[in-house]
Image: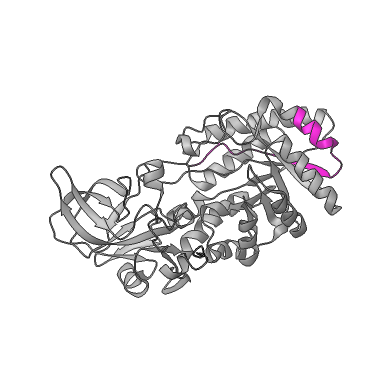
């Protein structure tokens, strides 16, 4: 939890200078709430560590794509990392620049490639030989040179959850390390590709620096071989994935992490290259909370259940990754604490948000689910025909609705009944 952004006054949770109770009363629940100061502080930690070095920051849009959130970073001078043309549209709508945007992703379509080329993105992170050929053909048809970097899979264990580990040779991402040198030679020979960099992304929620340094060493060894083959590499993209504290994790501070990576690259004699960072979770994760109201307290034969109005469709991480999110009652009560399974209304046994949580709560109380700013709303769905939550941003004493709550009629507005 970002201490300056989330605190208590007279026992009531505050988001910056606004009571979480008043936010729930004004905007309803479930409700995602973001702190602008927490977003800004996290970005500045990256920017300060990069100051005076050849390093740039590209915010991973997939972690939180709300326009207001992206606009905070655009105003601070951020670049962006996208994985779809839809995310490119969001970046541009939020005030970001295509020329500061890197297009990643394992399955870019030809249409997406054309859109990104027309917009003038900074670089395509290409992940396979067939994608190289497809991009070359799209660029040729458009009469353009596509700037490319190959995402190399360094086969480094990020020591994280299997679903968010992306740098092992068994993962779908990137070009195999053993094939990378030959693939670079093929890319350099293609008429409408301009090879400018090398990229890797080994996973997410990484809480140690050492896997990054291992990956960087393998990348730099490869860079030296590629340049010996006659292709110049201008930048090294080390991806994102730095972890945050959900419970008792102890990831390195942002500045410590950035300086360690940059110093390692310089010590290897590659300080003349630009370095790209692509943070997501570490920028937005602890800048957001999900507010939810207790609908019922249901005692059971083996477990007690706190049934809340948020569900797995609102916050998928617990059901999908068995992820832990700290929870607290928004208002401290003298009620006797009990151990609860915190569950939602969705008709699935997997619909849980927290297991074995000791909470002093009553029916109608508000719960705050912390560290919900990353992979929260962006992964939400309309399962069980449930409208998605509203999103609010708080800036000191001001709270602004930055995404309206959906209405049920919107969910089937584009559907029709087959005639006859």
Q: At which x and y percent is residue 314? A: 39, 56
Q: Quadrant of the N terminus?
A: bottom left
Residue 257 in the image: state x and y as whole percent. 54, 42
Residue 12: quarter of image: bottom left
Q: Residue at x 24, y 61 (%)?
A: 294
Front residue of 163/243: it is 163
Towards the viewer: 314 or 96? 314
Asked if residue 272 can be seen in this view, the reply is: no
Q: Nearer the viewer, residue 266 or 240?
A: 240
* Horizontal side of residue 394 vs 81, given as left or right: left
Rendered position, 44 above or below 198: below
Q: Which residues are magenta?
A: 182-204
- Which color mode does the image show? one colour
User: Could you tell me if residue 28 is visible in this image?
Assistant: yes
For residue 191: magenta? yes
Residue displayed at 68% across by 54% down: 101
157 magenta-colored? no
Question: Relative to residue 222, is residue 239 drawn left or right?
Answer: left
Determine the residue positioned at 71% across, 29% down: 180
Where 112 falls versus 366 (above or below)? above
Q: Residue at x 51, y 55 (%)?
A: 42
- Whole-percent x and y of residue 6? 37, 61
Viewer-closest of 174 and 344:
344
Q: Residue furthest front?
A: 420
Where 119 sits versus 183, above or below? below
Q: Could you tell me how many numbered marks the image carries?
A: 0
Asked where in the image residue 407 lies, by quadrant, the reply is bottom left
How far across and how far down the image is residue 48, in percent?
58, 53
């Amino acid at each position: 939890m970002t201490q300056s952004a989330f605190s208590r006054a007279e026992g009531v949770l505050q988001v910056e200078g606004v009571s979480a109770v008043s936010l729930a009363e004004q905007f309803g629940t479930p409700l995602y709430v973001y702190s602008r100061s927490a977003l800004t502080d996290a970005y500045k930690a990256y920017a300060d560590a990069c100051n005076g070095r050849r390093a740039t920051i590209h915010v991973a849009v997939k972690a939180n794509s709300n326009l207001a959130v992206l606009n905070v970073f655009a105003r601070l001078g951020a670049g962006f990392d996208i994985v779809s043309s839809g995310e490119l549209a969001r970046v541009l709508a939020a005030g970001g620049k295509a020329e500061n945007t890197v297009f990643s992703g394992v399955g870019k379509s030809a249409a997406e490639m054309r859109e990104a080329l027309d917009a003038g993105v900074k670089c395509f992170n290409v992940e396979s030989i067939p994608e190289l050929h497809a991009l070359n053909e799209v660029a040729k048809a458009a009469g353009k040179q596509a700037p490319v970097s190959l995402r190399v899979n360094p086969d480094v264990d990020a020591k994280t959850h299997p679903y968010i580990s992306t740098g092992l040779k068994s993962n779908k991402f990137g070009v195999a390390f053993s094939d990378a040198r030959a693939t670079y030679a093929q890319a350099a020979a293609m008429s409408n590709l301009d090879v400018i960099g090398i990229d890797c992304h080994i996973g997410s929620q990484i809480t140690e620096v050492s896997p990054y340094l291992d990956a960087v060493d393998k990348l730099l060894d490869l860079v030296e071989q590629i340049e010996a083959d006659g292709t110049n590499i201008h930048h090294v993209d080390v991806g994102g994935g730095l972890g945050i504290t959900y419970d008792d994790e102890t990831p390195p501070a942002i500045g410590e992490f950035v300086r360690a990576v940059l110093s390692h690259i310089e010590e290897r004699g590659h300080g003349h290259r630009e370095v790209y960072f692509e943070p997501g979770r570490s920028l937005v994760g602890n800048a957001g909370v999900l507010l939810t109201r207790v609908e019922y307290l249901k005692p059971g034969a083996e477990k007690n259940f706190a049934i809340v109005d948020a569900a797995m469709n609102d916050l998928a991480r617990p059901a999908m990754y068995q992820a832990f999110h700290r929870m607290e009652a928004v208002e401290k009560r003298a009620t006797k604490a009990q151990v609860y399974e915190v569950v939602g209304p969705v008709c699935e046994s997997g619909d849980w948000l927290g297991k074995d949580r000791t909470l002093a709560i009553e029916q109608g109380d508000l719960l705050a689910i912390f560290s919900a700013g990353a992979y929260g709303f962006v992964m939400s769905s309309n399962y069980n025909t449930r409208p998605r939550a509203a999103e609010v941003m708080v800036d000191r004493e001001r709270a602004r609705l930055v995404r309206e709550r959906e209405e049920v009629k919107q969910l089937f507005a584009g559907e029709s009944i087959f005639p006859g």
